Image (spheres, rainbow, N blue to C red):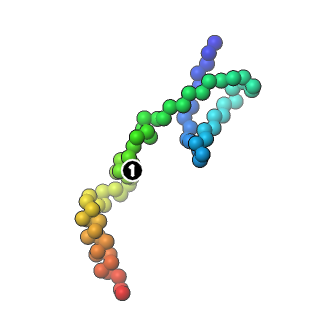
Amino acid sequence: MQRALHLKTTVLPGGKIEIVDQSLPVGESVDVIVSQSEDSAGRSAVDILSEAPGHLMFKTAAEVALYLKEERDSWDC
């Protein structure tokens, strides 16, 4: 009987993936199929940052520029 094992893991540095399951028989051949999760594949940095807490502080580049100008103007130089 063929048994399937479904695990989620994180890709380690160097593209390595580690699978640990004590029920896997030592020395036996297994087939491994890897697929990227839909939630992580193809997400842009903008999408990820938009979900971060506090991401609504600035809505435009002009708002960022104004904030930075006001900060610089407040410095004692």
From this view, report whether residue 19 is shown above or below residue 51: above
Residue 26 against residue 53 in the figure, above or below: above
User: Residue 46, percent across and down?
Assistant: 35, 50
- Residue at image point 35% right, 82% down: 75
Q: Residues within 10 Å of mark 1 (few under 14, many from 20)?
A: few
**Left or right for 76, reference 3:** left
Q: Residue 4: name its quadrant.
A: top right
The answer to whether residue 39 is seen in the rendering is yes
Total marks in image: 1
* Amino acid found under the numbered disc labelled 1: Ala
Residue 3: which quarter of the image? top right
Q: Residue furthest right?
A: 27
Residue appearing at x 62%, y 24% in the figure: 31
Answer left or right for 54 relative to 4: left
Q: Residue at x 29, y 65 (%)?
A: 64
In this orientation, which residue lies closer to the viewer: 14 or 77? Answer: 14
Pick the residue in front: 17 or 67. 17
**Which quarter of the figure is the N terminus placed in?**
top right
Q: Quadrant of the C terminus?
A: bottom left
Q: Position of residue 44 (x, y in %)?
A: 38, 46
Which residue is farthest top? 1
Q: Residue at x 54, y 35 (%)?
A: 8
Q: Secondary structure at mark 1?
A: helix
Q: Quadrant of residue 68?
A: bottom left
Measuring from the top left, give residue 36's x and y in whole percent.
Answer: 48, 35
Which residue bears the numbered disc 1? 45
| Place of residue 60 in the rendered image (x, y in percent of width and height, measured from the top left) | 25, 60
Q: Residue furthest bottom?
A: 77
Examine the rendering and report whether any part of residue 51 can be seen.
no
